[in-house]
Amino acid sequence: MKNLVRVQSIDRAVAILECFTENKRELKLSDIANMLDLNKSTVHGLLNTLKYHGFIEQDEINQKYRLGTRFIVYSDLVLNSMDIINISYPVIERVCEKIEETVHIAMLDGTDVVYIEKKECTKSIKTSTRIGARIPAYVTADGKIILCYLEKDKLKELLPRNIKKLTSNTITDKHQLLESFSDIKSNGYAVDYEETVQGLVCIAAPIMDYNGEVKYSLSATCPTVRMTEDKLKEYIDIIKKSANEISCRIGYRG
């Protein structure tokens, strides 16, 4: 990367595009020139070139510039090419090697979470799961970390009237469950301690897309006999950082 050759005019064109933000959707020529500390003539030439290619548009009345509709075409191409499985697998493989426990990527489908990718550990006592397996979202860390980001009305629709008790630790009180989602969201992770399967603990963190919406989760599952307080803290940190890495890879900029 040290010997990377850069073209000044392209650097400046990119800098112009980056002047536009949510709060600065339209800008005058003088605004852009001042922001970049460039001559108006230089900026004008670059803007005209970007206009020609459809990356910049100009209002005919106030003469202000804005991002062009050409970006819509390319945004669709980028978004459609983002394969969460291919993007996330190197990360979950690394996490699995580091903590030596089974790691998953899951997504919400209706009222269930579905495992869409996994990397199993090689220990004799391990969590064996199946890609495509479905679990009620409200009992597992994967589901809870996605559910807690939903609007309350949507959340209430998804929770069943009578919550089935899968283990002695399953939370069946709807009010208690809804209250727990607030803490989960604040903490940035969820822990399912034998709520789904007796003898298993699961730690999950959210994977956010380019809009900041939580569409997937990253989790690690391991037998409770191997879990200690120190390990739990360590795994939470690893899972949160790794989920954030995947989020950035699929376009999250938070």
Image: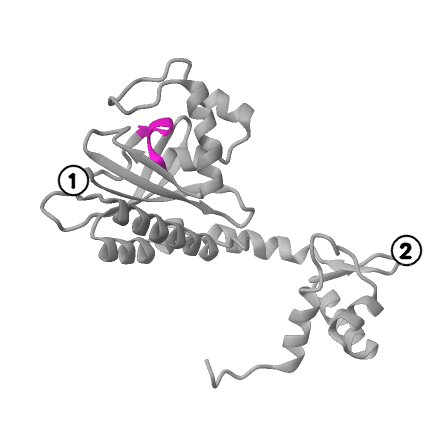
**What residue is at 87 percent from the left and 57 percent from the top?**
60
Farthest top residue in view: 162
Find residue 36 and report its horizontal and vertical position in percent: 74, 73
Find residue 74 and report its horizontal and vertical position in percent: 58, 57
For the residue pair 171 and 138, the one nearer the viewer reads as 171
Farthest bottom residue in view: 3
What's the residue type where badge 2 is placed?
Answer: Ile
Find residue 120 and report its horizontal and vertical position in percent: 20, 48
Dot 2 falls on a residue whose secondary structure is: loop
Q: Left or right of 178: which side holds 125?
A: left
Q: Left or right of 146: which side holds 77?
A: right
Q: Is residue 118 visible?
A: no
| Residue at numbered disc 1 | 225
Task: Examine the image and state in which quarter residue 114 appears.
Answer: top left
What's the residue type where badge 1 is placed?
Answer: Val
Q: CA distance from mark 1 to mark 2?
A: 70 Å
Q: Left or right of 190: which side holds 128?
A: left
